[in-house]
Amino acid sequence: MAFTEAERERITAALKASGRRLFATAGLRKTSLAALVADAGIVKSTFYAFFESKEALYLHLLLEQAEETRRRTIDEGLHAGTDARDALRRFLRAAVGILSTDPLYRRLVTHPDELAMVVAKVGPETARPPGENPAPVDFVDDLTTYIAERQRAGAVTGTDPAVVVGALRTVLLVPLHADEFGEAYPAVLDLTIDALTAGLAPGTARA
């Protein structure tokens, strides 16, 4: 079936809107093609004229926001720190800010298996283009590289960057329990970030 350019733009926009909503709430596995195409006004078979699979749509949505996420967490976060401790704090606060406002990113953090499903379906070359971002939205490679460099300089404790990254990622669990903390949540989050980064980067070496 042929579509005009305007029709393709409208349908693509509708599929992306449905994808953002459904993937963030129901998840990749439980989102059906019927649900995805409902607002676009097309039948299920026509979906494939726009995206090769549900996973391809999911990846498309992640890549659309990847540069903005990278800018906030890496460029304006990690790499803007005055020293290692400040850099890690900036990274964590930026990541928490995105987690608190972006439902799809929140879903990715709470269900990392879904990104694995996407990579398995579309292929690692598509999810990790040569010379491009290491993976959509999940910038562990950038953080790991930074930590390894700062460990060699003696600005971050430990010798295994993966352990430090794992410790830092535990901060992302705090917003997921914000309702349980109630009014104390902002203070709990601040103390968690400050205590963790002070322990990992006790010195004041320049970043």
Image: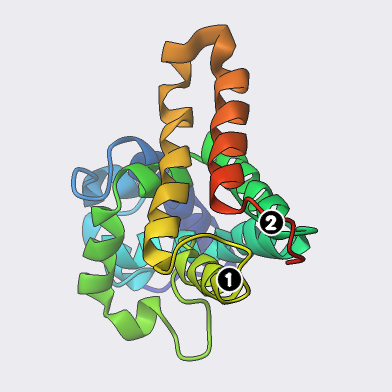
Q: Residues within 10 Å of mark 2 (few under 14, many from 20)?
A: many
Of 39 and 200, nearer the camera is 200
Give x and y (percent) for residue 14.
Answer: 47, 50
Residue at image position (38%, 41%) is: 24
Please, is residue 191 above or below residue 133 in the view? Answer: above
Of 175 and 64, nearer the camera is 175
Q: Residues within 10 Å of mark 1 (few under 14, many from 20)?
A: many
Disc 1 residue type?
A: Tyr
Q: Residue furthest top?
A: 183
The tag on residue 146 is 1
Which residue is identified by label 2?
87
Give x and y (percent) for residue 170.
Answer: 41, 42
Q: How many badges with numbers are in the image? A: 2
Residue at image position (38%, 53%) is: 166
What is the C-alpha distance between the residues marked 1 and 2?
10 Å
Residue at image position (41%, 74%) is: 2
Task: Name the quadrant containing residue 201.
Answer: bottom right
